[in-house]
């Protein structure tokens, strides 16, 4: 089971790195020569995907966090509604 999790984590990290690499390529090209309409659409989609991944990761981390108060009580971090 651990090998599967390690493989999946490595695959996710690789995909994330490739996503960032492509975002950076498009950003450089935008500054140097400009982007076509298709590239602008791709850049927007990639940036939205990146934001969704970051927000999802942060949400997952917050879901597992607990706050310990000075009086010793411990409460789960809850999603705001």
Image (cartoon, rainbow, N blue to C red):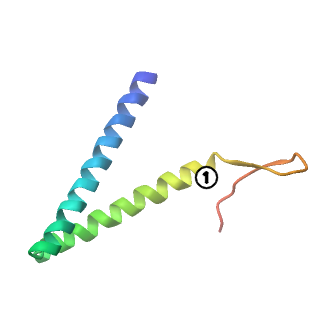
Q: Which of 44/81 is in front?
A: 44
Question: Going by the image, does 11 lie left or right of 56?
Answer: left
Q: Position of residue 73 (x, y in %)?
A: 86, 47
Query: Does residue 43 appear left or right of residue 7 in this picture?
Result: left
Q: Which residue is mark 1?
A: 62
User: Could you tell me residue 11's position as x and y percent?
Assistant: 31, 37
* Depth order, front residue of 24/81: 24
> Where residue 77 sits in the image (x, y, percent)?
70, 54
Disc 1 crowd, CA 10 A, few/some/many (<14, 14-19, 20+):
some
Q: Residue at x 23, y 54 (%)?
A: 21
Tell me the quarter of the image containing the C terminus: bottom right
Residue 25 pos. (x, y %): 18, 61
Quick one: SS at disc 1?
Answer: helix
Q: Is residue 9 left or right of residue 27?
A: right
Is the N terminus in the top left, top right, bottom left or bottom right quadrant?
A: top left
* Residue ID at (34%, 42%): 13
Q: Residue at x 63, y 45 (%)?
A: 64
């Amino acid at each position: 089971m651990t090998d599967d999790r390690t493989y999946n984590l490595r695959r996710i990290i690789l995909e994330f790195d490739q996503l960032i690499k492509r975002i950076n390529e498009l950003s450089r090209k935008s500054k140097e020569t400009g982007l076509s309409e298709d590239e602008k659409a791709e850049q927007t989609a990639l940036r939205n995907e990146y934001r969704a991944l970051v927000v999802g990761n942060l949400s997952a981390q917050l879901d597992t966090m607990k706050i310990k108060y000075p009086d010793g009580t411990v409460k789960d971090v809850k999603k705001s509604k």
